[in-house]
Amino acid sequence: MKRTLVALAAMASLGAMAETSMTIYGVIDGGLRQDSNAAKTSAGATQSQSQFLNGTLNTSRFGFKGTKDLQSGLKANFKLESGFTEGNGQDAGNVVNPAVTTVPQTASTYSKNTLFDRTASAGLQGSWGAIDLGRVTAFAYDLNAGYVNDPLGLEMTNNNHYVAAKAFNINPQGLAIQSSFFTVRRDNSFKYTGTFGGLSVGAAYSLANVAGSQSAGSSMQAMAKYSGNGFTLAASTDSLQDANSLKQTLSTFGGNVTVSGFKITAGGTQLSTPAGFAPVASSFTSNSYSNPSGFIVGGSSAAQTKINVADIGVAYQMGLFNIVGGYYNAQIQQGALANNTVNTLIVRVRYALDPSTDLYVEADNSKATGLVEAKAAGASLSDTGFTAGLQYRF
């Protein structure tokens, strides 16, 4: 017993000297969703649906992260994070979109080979900033999920509803920033971030590990954010190249200002995919690419496709209630199909039972305009949805 106590004391002493820390963390989020036009029948008509939603506001996940003091102001860090679905206990890496007769539970299709599908990285950090190597998040995701450019912080982007014969993310920012287009995470990456006073900057480069070509499947990203007295402005750029030197580009910009307790946020995102773009498969081991033209009735991957999303919203903290309202305008453009437009209103209320547990309710309405093809298919041009759920964080 005495030897055991001495050993434990020695280990604790060594741990204190090294200043090593590790945290186990996670989010469990699920709820009930009702849509007026949620699913498509085999004939193409839409119908109402009630369903259990996984990752309603935010993807359910668990992870491990830690740091170790290497002395002289230098630290080592790591982060491993995996998503899962609360409704059936599956890891998100095993989720595959169901048939078109039901609402897809996620906005992307995953492979079954990724243990840590959300993040797997290690790196170094100091006064000069931080560099992380591995599978990391994209800057466009960081800014929008961080409530900088999106009033809802990419909440309500994991699930779809049918508007004008196509499955759209409830929060339209998820149209451009989603795993299906490889704009959320990148494999084989070197990612730098640094903060100097109110200015934060970032740069990232990703490889596809293609023999004979360093550029095939590679990507480059840049980010800048400035925070002052009650306001933040930010922007990011992203360029992903295929084996034929075609480049898919993504840009996001916006910011927020807080006045008398009201946080006003506005932003924009543009995804542009050239005709014939086909990313290198080895660039992304955990996802299957879906060309953005799939959002367009009558669209084709043989033509350039653009997705433009603009948002504006207001958030207010009233005691234990966090209230957010947002308006989104999404335009999916391709040649003569330039009027593929969806306007969405979302209101979400969270009630904090304690610092780790929230109850929430949400209501949204989306309406498509200018879609003659969708009308001919017998599909509804609008959807109204209501959501209620619980989120637990640890």
Image (cartoon, helix red, strand yellow):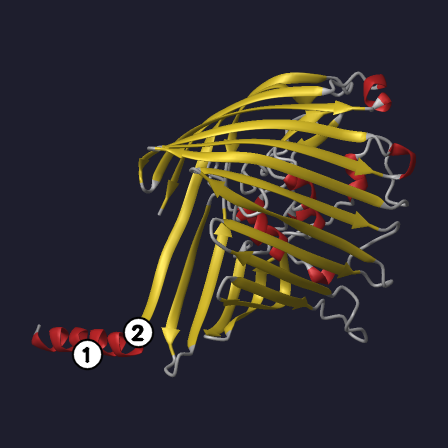
Residue 301: x, y in percent? 86, 44
User: Residue 260, located in which quarter of the rendered image?
Assistant: top left
Q: Disc 1 and disc 2: Cα gap in Å?
A: 14 Å
| In the image, farthest residue toward the bottom | 72
Amino acid type, label 1 = Ala
70 or 348: nearer the viewer: 348
User: Residue 139, located in which quarter of the rendered image?
Assistant: bottom right
Looking at the rendered image, the quarter that the N terminus falls into is bottom left
Query: Element at badge 2?
Result: loop
From this viewpoint, is residue 164 visible?
A: no
Residue 279: x, y in percent? 78, 57
Q: What is the number of the mark on residue 10?
A: 1
Comes first in the chain, label 1 or label 2: 1
Q: Residues within 10 Å of mark 2 (few under 14, many from 20)?
A: some
Amino acid type, label 2 = Glu
Residue 112: x, y in percent? 60, 51
Above or below, 302 relative to 298: below
Task: Name the mark nearer the viewer: 1 or 2.
Answer: 2
Residue 8: x, y in percent? 18, 73
Find disc 2 in the rendering and name its residue: 19
From this viewpoint, is residue 374 visible?
A: yes
Kindly check if marks 1 and 2 are in contact, taking CB atoms under 8 A apart as contact.
no
- For image coordinates 43% across by 74% down, the residue present is 76
- For image coordinates 30% across by 74% down, the residue present is 19
Above or below, 6 relative to 183: below
User: Residue 280, located in which quarter of the rendered image?
Assistant: bottom right
- For image coordinates 65% across by 48% down, the residue present is 179
Locate residue 97 relative to residue 81 in the image: left or right: right
Locate residue 388 relative to residue 20 in the image: left or right: right
